[in-house]
Amino acid sequence: MIPRIAVVGYKKSGKTTLVKTISRILQEQGYKVLPIKHIPHKEFTIEKDPNKDTAQLLNTINITAYIAESGETGLLLRCESIEKSIDTIYRIAAALEANVLIFEGFRELFLKDEYTLKIICIKTIEEIKDFDNIEGPYIFCTLSNINDSRIVRLPDDLNILRRLVLSYIDVMNILRKLPKINCGKCRAGSCLKMAELIYRGMATLQECKVLSQRKGVKLVVNDAEIPLNEFVQKLLKNVVKAFVQSLKGVPEKLESVHVYVDFS
């Protein structure tokens, strides 16, 4: 799960400025950042003239790439919905080896996502009440002259913003090592809360009941790890071992076996 930051707020609240600021902070720390901007105009298109080659190609097969002599390269996709477009972005981000995604906009998509850090840009103190249905981590931020302990004020509080963003990414990188199944067997109650405890030095990965029961066997279905008890792990391990050793060209000594099955 790549750490996701969603910068949301009303028009002219400073969202783009904040995206640039966060991108610069993360690049200085060695992260490879991919910003994604939401354009809330249904008539928007890069190629205005429908008779141009690029537009005709896109209308024909819903995907095309362009490479300009200026050095600019682009990939144009036409998806049925924002959700499907986001899924495509995740795959592109993985191919580009991006390790942080920054979304500008997409308020309705991310406000209730417990794994996404929401950075909410406000122009007035009254706007806080418009964001009372948030779930998961969030930060109120402003470029205006607002003095309130709940709000990170830029540029004065830049170091505070840097610390909060980097700590979120550290927590998410710890979460990637956990099974993310929220089995409820640990004292934290959820994988995200366990990651936060580990980040604070109040817990260790070994406290995860699923990880502690793993005996060299890991089952992942649709990018989610499925917990297996010791008996099932041993059974699966023996079945795979017997099958693989029956094949020609397999070394006599097995150290590890990875099987990938695509059911699409």
Image (spheres, rainbow, N blue to C red):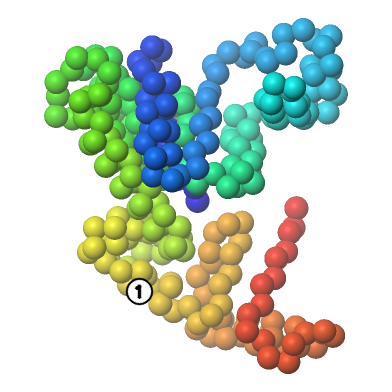
Label 1: how many residues lie within 10 Å, few (<14), some (14-19) or many (20+)? few
Quadrant in which residue 4 is drawn: top left
- In the image, taking residue 255 as reference, residue 13 lies left or right, namely left
Observer able to see residue 7:
no
Quadrant in which residue 69 is drawn: top right
- In the image, taking residue 149 as reference, residue 49 lies left or right, namely right
- In the image, taking residue 109 as reference, residue 65 lies left or right, namely right
Considering depth in this image, is 151 or 218 the residue closer to the camera?
A: 151
- Residue farthest toward the bottom in the current orientation of the protein: 252
Amino acid carrying mark 1 in the image = Gln
How far from the left and from the top, in percent, is residue 99? 50, 46
Total labels: the figure holds 1
Q: Going 34% across and 58% down the picture, which residue do you hit?
A: 195
Q: Going 58% across and 13% down the picture, which residue do you hit?
A: 41
How far from the left and from the top, in percent, is residue 27? 43, 39
Q: Going 75% across and 27% down the picture, which residue do you hit?
A: 67
Secondary structure under tag 1 reads helix
Q: Going 67% across and 14% down the picture, which residue do you hit?
A: 45
How far from the left and from the top, in percent, is residue 44? 64, 13
- Residue farthest toward the front in the current orientation of the protein: 70
Q: Is residue 216 above or below residue 42?
A: below
**Residue pointed to by mark 1:** 206
How far from the left and from the top, in percent, is residue 190? 35, 58
Considering depth in this image, is 166 or 78 the residue closer to the camera?
A: 166
